Amino acid sequence: MTDDREALQASWNQTHDHLDAARTHLTHLPDIDLSATLEFLEHNELGLAFDCLVDLGDDLDLPLSFWQHLDRAAREMRLYSDALHRPHLTAADFCRRHLAAASEQE
């Protein structure tokens, strides 16, 4: 049981680190309110923080590394496999689209 908790904590830490790294890409931009994202991160609501970051970055021309961090967080949280069972587009779907577009530009 301890191994499971340690693995879960390690996964949470990695996800949190990726979300926080993505967030840093937005900190210098004017008119971007990161208060909700920070609150979600502080309260371990990583899925909601992910959704916020994707939503904030959706209309911005952000570097590939922003989307790579979100992609790694989505993989750690297994959001892509969950998205396959939903009839509507999710934040994970938007993340994949932006990751692909940013990758083509690099």
Image (cartoon, rainbow, N blue to C red):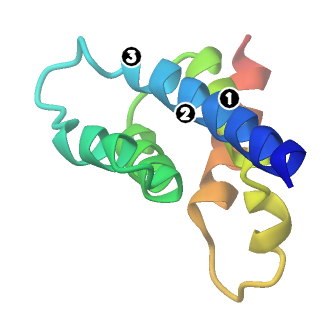
Contact between labelled residues 3 and 1, with CB atoms less than 8 Å apart:
no
How many C-alpha atoms fall within 10 Å of the one at disc 1: few (<14), some, or many (≥20)?
some
In the image, residue 34 above or below residue 84: above
Figure quadrant of the N terminus: bottom right
Figure quadrant of the C terminus: top right
In primary-sequence order, the first of circles 1 and 3 is 1
Q: Circle 3 sits on which residue? A: 24
Please indicate, yes or no, whether residue 62 appears anywhere in the rendered image.
no
Q: Is residue 2 left or right of residue 35?
A: right
Compare residues 54 and 11 and report the one nearer the observer.
Answer: 11
Q: Circle 1 sits on which residue? A: 14
Describe the element under mark 1 as helix, strand or loop: helix
Q: Give how far across and how far down residue 82 sits, in percent.
A: 78, 72
In the image, residue 27 above or below residue 5: above
Query: Distance between the Cα atoms at labels 2 and 1?
Result: 5 Å
Which amino acid type is shown beneath numbered disc 1? Gln
